[in-house]
Image: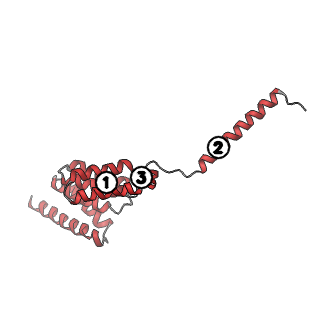
Amino acid sequence: MAISKKNLIYIIIGALITGILFFSFLSISQPQIPPGEKEYREAPEKAQSLLQEAESLFDEGKYQEALEKYQEFLDQYPNSDRADNALLMIGRSQMLLGADDGALLTFQNLIENYPKSNNIPDALCHSARIYSIKGNFEKAEEYCDKILMEYPNLTGSQQWIIEASQKLKSEIQNQKLSQ
């Protein structure tokens, strides 16, 4: 039984298609790790070291250096489960350096990109304070209301957010009355 050239071509094409499909399914079955997350898994010591260094710099009042370390962490580990913390601290550093507009953008980035983060009330509170300082009392009050309505039961280390929001809202209302 001889195989004709035509049948041989069909067999080769069929084998190629089968091979391509087989290897395609193999690559699909491999777990896909988002960029950045793989690095975090491979080098958690380095990631932790960056965060600890950034935290130390922040605690020492070296806000520009801390901001740079937090940004370095985000650049290297963008999919880390600590990325929202790094954003919050970048925003706080910017705020303490007087870069209020940058801080507002950073806090907004945190709010929009990490909607389930525990740091949202913190970002909202800092944003409200900045808007109040800038004289945008309506926006500041809006953020305070959002905190008080959506996060009324903050406890522990976040209790200050409720108290600060209530105080700021009262200050805003007094400011409105005096105008």
Q: Which residue bears the numbered disc 3?
A: 79
Q: Residue 109 placed where, x, y %?
A: 32, 51
Residue at (73% x, 33% y) in the render: 13
Q: Residue furthest left?
A: 178
Quarter of the C terminus within the rendering: bottom left
Q: Residues within 10 Å of mark 2 (few under 14, many from 20)?
A: few
Give residue 46's quadrant in the image: bottom left
The numbered mark, 1 or 3, whose residue comes first in the sequence reads 3
Please say which color scheme the image uses. secondary structure
Q: Is residue 124 left or right of residue 77?
A: left
Q: Residue 83 placed where, x, y %?
A: 36, 55
The numbered mark, 2 or 3, whose residue comes first in the sequence reads 2
Q: Residues within 10 Å of mark 1 (few under 14, many from 20)?
A: many
Q: In the rendered structure, which amino acid carries the disc numbered 3?
A: Asn
Q: Residue furthest top?
A: 5
The numbered mark, 1 or 2, whose residue comes first in the sequence reads 2
Q: Nearer the viewer, residue 41 or 96?
A: 41
Q: Tell me the element at label 1.
A: helix
Q: In the rendered structure, which amino acid carries the disc numbered 2?
A: Phe
Q: Which residue bears the numbered disc 1?
A: 87
Quarter of the N terminus within the rendering: top right
Whether residue 142 can be seen here: no
Give residue 12's quadrant in the image: top right
Q: Residue furthest right?
A: 1
Q: Tell me the element at label 2.
A: helix
Q: Which residue bears the numbered disc 2?
A: 23
**Callout in the foreground (1, 2):** 2
Q: Tell me the element at label 3.
A: loop
Label 1–label 3 contact, CB within 8 A: no
Residue at (78% x, 34% y) in the render: 11
Residue at (64% x, 43% y) in the render: 23
